Structures are given as C-alpha cells and as structure tokens.
Image (cartoon, grey):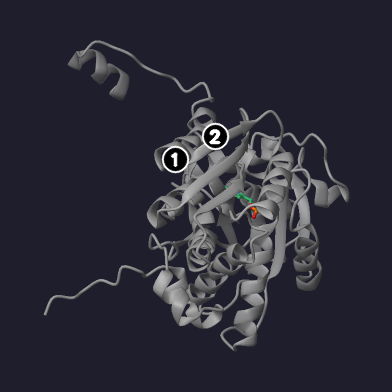
Amino acid sequence: MKKILSRRIGIIERYKEFMCVSDKTLECIVSLNEGDTPLILSEHLAERVGCDLRVYFKFEGLNPTGSFKDRGMTFAVTNAVEEGKKAVICASTGNTSASAAAYASRAGLKCFVVIPEGNVAKGKLCQAFRHGAKVIQIKGNFDQALEIVKQITEKHPIQLVNSLNPYRIEGQKTASFEICDLLGCAPDYHAIPVGNAGNITAYWKGFKEYKQAGKIDSLPKMIGFQAAGAAPIVHGHPIEHPETLATAIKIGNPASWKQAEAARDESGGLIEAVTDDEIVAAYRFLAEKEGIFCEPASAASVAGVIKLAKRNYFKGGEVITCTLTGHGLKDPDLALSFDDEVIVIDADLKKIEKIIVG
Ligand SMILES: *Cc1c(COP(=O)(O)O)cnc(C)c1O
C-alpha cells in the first residue's frame, strides 16, 4: 500500500496536546510543515571562549520562509481561517511579513504588511511581494507601524498577526518542546535575540508547560540579548530612535516587554545588550567556523553567549542552546558588505592554477 503523507505535519499537528485546538481547528490547519528544525552542536564556540561549554544552535532559519515566525504564523493564520476572516495584517521588520504573506497565500487570504521604509532586508521584501502581499512602506519605524495596524484591526475585520496575537506565541513555544525532545532534558541556559520580545515569551511558556507536563525536570535560565542601539528593556525605557544593523531586532518599544522581564526574572536569567560589532563578529564566526549562515539579528544570541563566557558568567560544563532566528540569505546586502576579494580572470588554466597553488 502506498503511504499517504499527511498534508499537515506542522507544529500544530505534532504538539496539539499542548495547544488549545478544537476538531474544527484541526480541519482548518494552514501549514507549510514548519518546525522540526535541527539542533546543531557547536564545534568551535567552547574553544573560542576558552570555557568548557556544550553549545547547540537551534537553526530556525530552516523553517519554510526562513525564520521562526512560521511557527506562530501557521497558528495565527489557521485561527483567521477558523474565524472566517478574509484578510490578515501585520507590522513587520521583515520576517513577519514574509511569513504572513506565505501562509495567507496558501489559505487564500489577503495580506497587508506595513513596514518601515528602507529598513527591511531585501530577501524578506522579495518574499512579501512574491507571495502577493500588499506592501505598505511607511516613513516611520516599526513601533509606529505596529501602532497603526493595531488601530486598523480594532476597526475592521482584518486579523492582526503580530505577536500580540496569542496564537503566534502558542505556535512559537513549540521550539522549546523540540529542544527538550532532542536533548532529552532542558538546557541549563537558553540564549535568544530579543526584539519585540514575543519569542522569549513563547520559549519560556513552552519550557514551563513541558515541566508541568513532566517532560523535563528543570527549567533553563533565559538569557536574552538586544542590540545596544535598540535595548529598551536593558535601559528600562523605550528608545525613540532605535539603531542597529540587525534590522529584525531594531525595536524601541517591545510589545511583550513585561512578559520578557517575567521570563528573565522567573528563570533567574538576564537580558543584556550586545553591540553591532559583537553581533557581526558572531555572525561571521557562525558562517566561517561553524558553517551556519544566519541573519545578523540571529547572531545576537551567540554574541551574548561569547560576551558572558568572556566575563566568566558560566562555571563550565553547562549545556546552552542558542536560537538562530533567521537565515543569512535574508540580508544579502549585509552579507556582501565585507570587502571580499573578487577575482576576475581569463579562462586560462595556468593563471588560475597560479592563484590556487602558487
Ligand atoms: C522577529 C525576529 C526576531 C525578534 O523576535 P521577537 O519575538 O520580536 O523578540 C529576531 N530575529 C529574527 C530573525 C526575527 O525575524
């Protein structure tokens, strides 16, 4: 007999016992088989920081649209379909719009995305356009975009699919489940970039629910990292003009601020800032030494671990998991901004041989 692949093996189906889903929800699932991303053991980080650590990278760039946003979007769009909505809308630094556009196209819903002009990486913008979203660029920042879409959804029957939508958090918490399933226990620390702070909220919720269900015995300390020029939680006040090359975390007034602080405080972790130089160093380390190409914002988690290890925050022997939130191909402009040597030469064996073997 031919094996028939279910068309819906995404995170809702796999973890439905941990989600609030009805039979009707299961009938409506809009999925691109998101989740089930690899947990890759670091080969070189411990050596680099001179500390005996076991570090794993949860590479979320391998989701269908290239970021973790797909975990939340499958559930948010499924819910929009279940509620009979005909359109979805989001404010976005890029990846939310890419994901919303893809899932909305699959569900046959209209998609509107409001983004800060000039601050969205090209790969993400391509995705929003190709999946047929209506792209509205504002002369303003992410925080202003979010305020506008919130007001629109209060007036019109359009589903908000930013992480204020609780289904986003519910979907995203499944990354914690996968980490624990793969490790067979919880990590000692979980490192994560913090922008609008939905993801750190989701991970902490996931870890707590897994402990409550008896799947793990302990909880990790949550260590979150903001970019130094966009670090409202670290400074304790909103940043009116956030600045960082890590555009995915260029956010001055996070929607899930309180929940991020709760994750930090309940877990005994911390939220700190890393500079753009530290982010770029980690981004290049991951690509050049670990073979993993993530986007700059993603590298904030690893930049943070390197920074903490250098000041002897870890005792040694700990297991640390780091979320790498998105794929490096999302931001080709940054990737090509490093003065790489480009060799252009005749198609001549001798000349090329000379370059290769001297
Ligand atoms: C959305 C995003 C973040 C920030 O996640 P929050 O939930 O907003 O804190 C970080 N990195 C990438 C690549 C993202 O797309």
Characterize the local packing of mark 1: few (<14), some (14-19) or many (20 or more) Cα atoms within 10 angstroms. many
Residue 160 in the image: above or below residue 94: below
Q: Give residue 127's mark.
A: 1
The reply to whether the residue tagged 1 has its Cβ within 8 angstroms of ligand 1 is no
Residue 103 location (% of width, % of height)? 44, 54
* 60 sits to left or right of 199: left
**328 relative position to 253: left or right:** left
Which residue sits at x=43%, y=61%?
34
Give the residue displayed 59% in from the left and 83% down from the top: 216
Q: Looking at the figure, which quarter contains the C terminus?
A: top left
Q: Against 37, is 253 above or below? A: above
Q: Is mark 2 within 8 Å of ligand 1?
A: no
Position of 70 with respect to 225 (left or right) is left
The residues bearing labels 2 and 1 have C-alpha atoms spaced at a distance of 10 Å
Residue at image mark 2: 121
The amino acid on which the numbered mark 1 sits, given as a three-letter code, is Gln
Instruction: Determine whether the residue tagged by mark 1 lies in a helix, strand or loop.
Output: helix
